[in-house]
Image: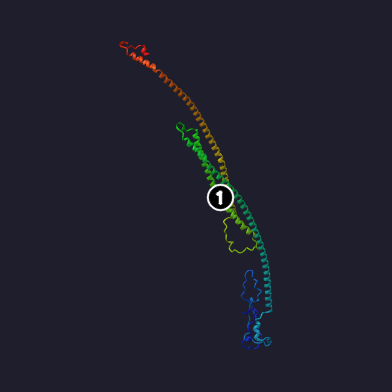
Amino acid sequence: MEFLGTSQAASYCGPKKPCALMAPPEAVQSPAVHECYPPYHLPGYRYLNSWRPSLFYQVSDGQACPDECRRSPLRPPTILPALRSALFCRYSAQDWDQATQLQLRGAEASRLWAGRLTGDTRRLMQDKDQLTRQMQEGTSRNLGQRLTDIGFWKSELCYELDRLLTENRSMDTLKRRLECGAEELNCPLQVALECLYHREKRIGIDLVHDSVEKNLIREVDLLKCCQEQMRQLARRIDIQMRDNRDAQHALERDIEDKNSAECIEEQCFNLRSTSDCISFFHGMEKCDGTISVPDTWAKFSNDSVRHSQNLRANSIRLREEAEHLPESLSDQLWKQFTDTNLAFNARIAEETEAKNKLHTQLAKTLQEIFQAENTIMLLERAIIAKECPLKVAQTRLACWNRRPNVELCRDIPQFR
């Protein structure tokens, strides 16, 4: 077996063998040519290597001239006997034409296939380029929509944060007002307690549980109740302010996250294929660090806004209650203060009337005492004036008791 285009070693290169002239053989079999080692072609690459002639080879089986061959007596040989075996191994012109046509057809098929492959590749490149541009434009539109959504929720959060801060400032002012109001009630409470303390200094029957004392005790209880209500409402406002601050921190944290996300989204939105800051990040398409989807993302901000709105509604109700409480307490305190003053005035009037009556009675009593003293003085004078008649009477009786015997008669002069 030899490759196509090579020649076997000539017979004259070896030792010369004697060969007599004999007639040509009756029938000389032509050399049989067949392919050896058929090439293996990958799918779609059948004609890539067909243009290389070095890869195409054939096996030719030539029959050497036997030793007993003889020259024909009728026709002399045209070539040397030593070259006969080499001539038998050569290809014919028909084989050469067939091989050439086969190479041409293979080259044409390879060229056509390469042309189709080039066209398909170009169309694929154009399709992929168009698809890439469409996907990049779609991603840019999605990023723009994402920026719009972030801006919307950011504005909602900022608006809600401003309103919540305003509500917190109003609640803080109202809390200080309630605390100051509770402290200011100490003065009226101290006055009422001082009144009760001084009324305990009454003596005797004047230490009576009258309407004034009842109104003072009611006023003290009302003042303490008002202080307790104001302080309790201030504590409720403080708790509500803590809840509002928690919501405020949540809104601020969400706004800060929105600002960071907006910066990142804007940076991604401005990225193009010609940007300088782009690079490869292998494995990023497999890494999924997301913790939310658009629905849960929007729901999170919506829940924050709704929670803040609910807290603001509670704060508004509490603030209205705190604003109405001083008015109602002021009305009650004023009413109780008026009742206490009326009781004081009534009690003072009663005591003044009683005092005036007592003074009148005292004047009358003093007059009577004066008259009694005058009468006593007259009586004393009259008594003194009756001493002489008494002496006369006693002297008479003494003289009458000296009458003798039966003359001691109990007669009318004796009784007189």
Dot 1 crowding, Cα within 10 Å, few <14, some 14–19, many 20+: some
- Residue 67: quarter of image: bottom right
Residue 44 lies left or right of residue 239; in this view the side is: right
The residue depicted at 68 percent of the width and 77 percent of the height is 96
Q: Quadrant where the C terminus lies?
A: top left
Q: Is residue 385 above or below residue 28?
A: above
Name the residue at the top extreme.
406
The residue depicted at 60 percent of the width and 55 percent of the height is 259
Q: Is residue 27 in view from this perspective? A: no
Q: Is residue 187 in view from this perspective? A: yes
* Residue at mark 1: 245
Q: Position of residue 352 (x, y in %)?
A: 51, 30
Q: Is residue 24 above or below residue 362?
A: below
Q: Is residue 135 above or below residue 234?
A: below
**Observer-nearest of 359 and 28:** 359
- Residue 270: quarter of image: bottom right
Residue 303 lies left or right of residue 208; in this view the side is: right
Q: Quadrant where the N terminus lies?
A: bottom right
**Observer-nearest of 373 and 228:** 373
Q: Position of residue 159 (x, y in %)?
A: 61, 50
Residue type at numbered disc 1: Arg
- Residue 16: quarter of image: bottom right
Q: Position of residue 43 (x, y in %)?
A: 63, 69
**For numbered disc 1, what is the local secondary structure?**
helix
